[in-house]
Amino acid sequence: MISQRHLGKLCPYAKDCPVYQEDLKIEKVSSFLIKNVFCNRGYKGWKNCERFKLADEGQEIPVTATPYKQR
Ligand code: SF4
């Protein structure tokens, strides 16, 4: 579990994250917005990201997974 002192910081998975690296684009949502809502927001942003949740639980992340819940 990542502590609250990481608030306002970059996601620890950003370096290898295809969403953050902009290799995986999300339809109708800009990378700028994604980063502000999830990646650069500290734990309060990361915890809403599906990719972060899977990574944090040590689960495999599907290649096409986005920060949003799959429908
Ligand atoms: S918050 Fe989610 S999308 Fe952003 S870098 Fe972390 S795992 Fe990737």
Image (tube, rainbow, N blue to C red):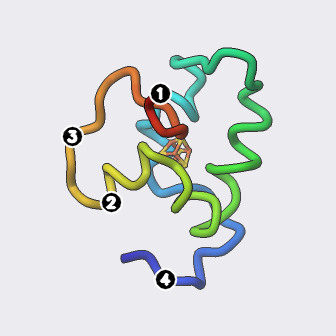
Residue occupying image coordinates x 42% and y 43%: 51
Q: Secondary structure at mark 3?
A: loop
| Marks 2 and 4, the one that precedes in the sequence | 4
Instruction: Identify the residue position indicated by label 4 in the image.
Output: 3
Image position of 25 with respect to 31: above or below: above
In the image, residue 42 above or below residue 11:
below
Q: Name the disc covering residue 60, or none.
A: 3
Q: CA distance from mark 1 to mark 4?
A: 24 Å
Q: Which mark is residue 56?
A: 2
Mark 2 residue element = helix
Looking at the rendered structure, the kind of residue marked 3 is Glu
Marks 3/1 in contact by CB < 8 Å: the verdict is no
Q: Quadrant of the C terminus?
A: top left
Q: Residues within 10 Å of mark 3 (few under 14, many from 20)?
A: few
Kindly identify the residue that appears in the image at 71 percent across and 68 percent down. 8
Q: Amino acid at mark 1?
A: Pro
Q: Mark 1 = which residue?
A: 18
For the residues labelled 2 and 4, the Cα–Cα distance comes to: 12 Å
| Neighbourhood count class around disc 4 (C-alpha, 10 Å): few under 14, some 14–19, many 20 upward | few
Which tag is nearer the camera, tag 2 or tag 1?
Answer: 2
Residue furthest front as drawn: 71
**Left/right of residue 62 with respect to residue 71 in the rendered view:** left
